[in-house]
């Protein structure tokens, strides 16, 4: 087996602004795995405030390349567990390796990954399209450029309701709101009432990530469901969210890949929680991995490749919210 690291710079279609800042380019890490003529791919976009870069991921991969390539595994879970104490502190690298392993695993059987996982794609959720923070006319323009049945609106300003009212005047689409930890408990309860009337489906992460007690005090008082994002990064976080959120947003890059994501979904379902899967700004490789898990989800945010202008890969596509699956086996994605 051979492993190759690719560091790619994804250019934002528009400056992407949330409460944490604005960016026009995102560095992503793509891992290429080849074994007996079969090529497989995985991807993870590291988050700068975690102190992890694609370069540090490549260095760590090089350090453990021999152990990874010499280990004989039958199921990706085995490789994930074997490497956890070595690279588990870098969930982003762990994710890229895990996705590539699942891609390889399915391709070895001549199956698409969702087939290998025993999943049926006859009925899967539509993806939302994300509208980043901007001047209201610009947010309206971005919304009209992509005709989607569901939009996720990034908020976190002192005029959030004004933004939503203006956008609602332009479309009948379902809205989802992502406050990116910018609100207080009192604001969340207050805003949820009017947002429900404005056609908002749920609110994502209104409070700071560690404000679990504050969330517990309002979770049964809000007019809308609350979905955890920053409060639910790794497997152990699902337990912390029980009784404090109505659902969790699982992100492959942050939790360490498909292996832990499947366990997080199972745990959330045990407690009757809704499950969403979100993406980062990433290429069609990362998006195609998410597509394989759609039958397990209630909601999905997989517009990452639509937010860039120089996608280096081909794979699953999202057209007006509907996922178009690629023809190839595994996750069906490849570098171009």
Image (spheres, rainbow, N blue to C red):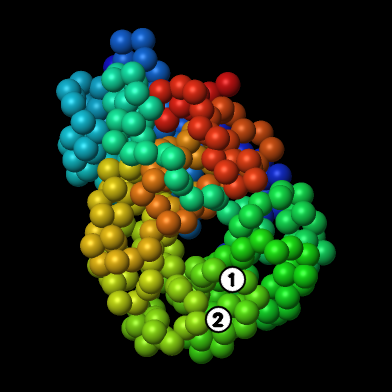
Upstream in sequence: badge 2 or badge 1 = 2
Q: Image check: 222 left or right of 199? A: left
The disc placed on residue 330 is none
The structure residue drawn at horizontal position 28% and vertical position 60%, both measured from the top left corner, is: 269
Sort mark 2 into few (<14), some (14-19) or many (20+) by Cα contacts within 10 Å.
Answer: many
In-front residue for pair 240/11: 240
Q: Which quadrant holds the N terminus?
A: top left
Q: Residue at the far top: name it.
A: 37
Q: Residues within 10 Å of mark 1 (few under 14, many from 20)?
A: many
Q: What element carries label 2?
A: helix
Q: What numbered label is drawn on residue 200?
A: 1
Q: Which residue: 32% across, 26% down? A: 106
Label 2 to label 1, Cα distance in Å? 8 Å
The answer to whether 268 is drawn above or below residue 123 in the figure is below
The structure residue drawn at horizontal position 73% and vertical position 75%, both measured from the top left corner, is: 165
The residue wearing badge 2 is 192
* Residue 15 visible in image: yes
Task: Single out the residue that lies furthest toward the right.
Answer: 137
**Residue 335: x and y, percent?**
53, 24
13 left or right, relative to 234: right
Tag 2–tag 1 contact (CB < 8 Å): yes
Residue 119 location, x and y as percent? 33, 39
- Image spot of residue 285 (x, y percent): 49, 33
Give the image location of residue 83, x and y in percent: 22, 37
Q: Who is closer to the viewer here, 104 or 282?
A: 104
Along the horizontal axis of the image, is 186 left or right of 58?
A: right
Residue 184 can be seen in this image: no
Secondary structure beneath label 1: strand
Question: The C terminus appears in which quarter of the rendering?
Answer: top right
Looking at the image, how many numbered discs can be counted on the residues? 2
x 69%, y 38%: residue: 309
């Amino acid at each position: 087996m051979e492993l190759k690291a690719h560091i790619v710079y994804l250019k934002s279609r528009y400056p992407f602004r949330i409460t944490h800042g604005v960016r026009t380019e995102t560095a992503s890490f793509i891992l290429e795995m080849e074994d007996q003529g079969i090529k497989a791919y995985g991807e993870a976009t590291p988050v700068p405030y975690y102190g992890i870069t694609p370069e540090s991921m490549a260095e760590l991969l090089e350090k453990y390349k021999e152990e990874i390539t010499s280990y004989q595994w039958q199921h990706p879970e085995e490789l994930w567990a074997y490497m956890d104490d070595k690279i588990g502190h870098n969930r982003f690298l762990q994710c890229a390796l895990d996705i590539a392993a699942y891609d390889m695993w399915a391709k070895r059987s001549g199956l698409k990954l969702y087939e290998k996982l025993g999943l049926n794609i006859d009925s899967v959720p539509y993806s939302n399209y994300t509208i980043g923070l901007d001047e209201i006319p610009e947010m309206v323009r971005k919304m009209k450029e992509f005709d989607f049945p569901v939009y996720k609106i990034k908020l976190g300003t002192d005029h959030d309701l004004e933004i939503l009212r203006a956008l609602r005047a332009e479309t009948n689409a379902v809205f989802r709101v992502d406050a990116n930890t910018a609100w207080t408990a009192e604001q969340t309860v207050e805003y949820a009432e009017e947002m429900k009337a404005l056609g908002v489906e749920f609110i994502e992460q209104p409070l700071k990530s560690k404000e679990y007690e504050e969330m517990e005090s309002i979770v049964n008082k809000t007019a809308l469901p609350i979905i955890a994002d920053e409060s639910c990064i790794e497997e152990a976080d699902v337990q912390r969210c029980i009784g404090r959120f109505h659902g969790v947003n699982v992100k492959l890059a942050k939790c360490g890949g498909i292996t832990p994501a499947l366990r997080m979904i199972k745990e959330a379902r045990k407690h009757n929680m809704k499950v969403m899967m979100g993406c980062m700004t990433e290429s069609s490789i990362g998006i195609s991995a998410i597509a394989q898990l759609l039958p397990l989800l209630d909601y999905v945010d997989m517009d990452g490749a639509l937010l860039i202008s120089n996608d280096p890969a081909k794979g699953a596509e999202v057209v007006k919210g509907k996922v178009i699956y690629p023809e190839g086996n595994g996750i069906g994605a490849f570098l171009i």
